[in-house]
Image (cartoon, rainbow, N blue to C red):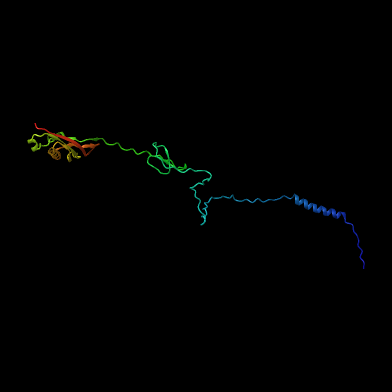
Amino acid sequence: MSYATENKRPNPMSMALAIGVNGSIILAVALSPVVVEQIKRDPFIGEAIDIEPLPPKADEKKPDTDTQPINDDVYVPPRETDTQTDNKNDIRAGTTETDTFSTVDGKGAGEIRFQDPVVEPPTPIFRAASRDPRFARDFQPDYPPGLLQKEIEGSASIRVLIGSDGRVREAQVVRATHPDFGRATVKQALKAWRFTPAMRGDVPVEDWQTLSVRFTID
């Protein structure tokens, strides 16, 4: 059996109708309004929180913030021994703090502090002891009997310690023309001599004095 193929020509009206329908659909899609929905979100409010630093590792060393790196190329002269100056405003090398001078580290670091010098109080005035005029008649010792009979005159000088109460606490012969004159003078001083005590400021103090006595026959 044989088949015969019949060639049919396309209908122009059908093609035009198909193209028109498709073009209408494309045009309708292109002209349709695009609806965009805007999503509204609440504003974000942040809050700052403290974050603790992580602890250092066991093998990690804490950096030393108290020291500063030193440049090996810079020559640093050795620190000199501290010296004292007369001016209280002078600056001394070293780190030792004193009462009257300020100090600063020899490399230029440190705090300068000034202190007032210690003022010593004035030394009280000293007034020596003096013989009490109320006991003037008791100053002359008794004449030694043996020397009086022989009509021997002479003198004696003794060194006495006058206490704060005006009495003689010690007596020593410095020189005498005869030993009896010295002994008689020491005896009289310890027994009867009275003085106005020495004063240092307003305080009575002890005082050493050397006094002389003459022995004469009237």
Q: Position of residue 193 (x, y in %)?
A: 15, 37
Number of labels in the image equals: 0
Left/right of residue 139 with respect to residue 125 in the rendered view: left
> Which residue is situated farthest in the bottom direction here?
1
Left/right of residue 80 with respect to residue 137 in the rendered view: right
> Which residue is situated farthest in the top direction here?
218
Q: Position of residue 189 (x, y in %)?
A: 15, 38
Nearer to me, 53 or 206: 206
Image quadrant containing the C terminus: top left
Nearer to me, 69 or 162: 162
Q: Residue at x 75, y 50 (%)?
A: 30
Which image quarter: residue 133? top left
Image quadrant containing the N terminus: bottom right
Q: Residue at x 21, y 37 (%)?
A: 198
Nearer to me, 45 or 183: 183
Left/right of residue 149 with respect to residue 19 in the rendered view: left
Q: Position of residue 43 (x, y in %)?
A: 59, 49
Q: Position of residue 146 (x, y in %)?
A: 8, 38
Q: Is residue 169 above or below residue 45?
A: above
Nearer to me, 103 or 15: 103
Q: Is residue 32 above or below residue 6?
A: above
Q: Residue at x 82, y 53 (%)?
A: 19
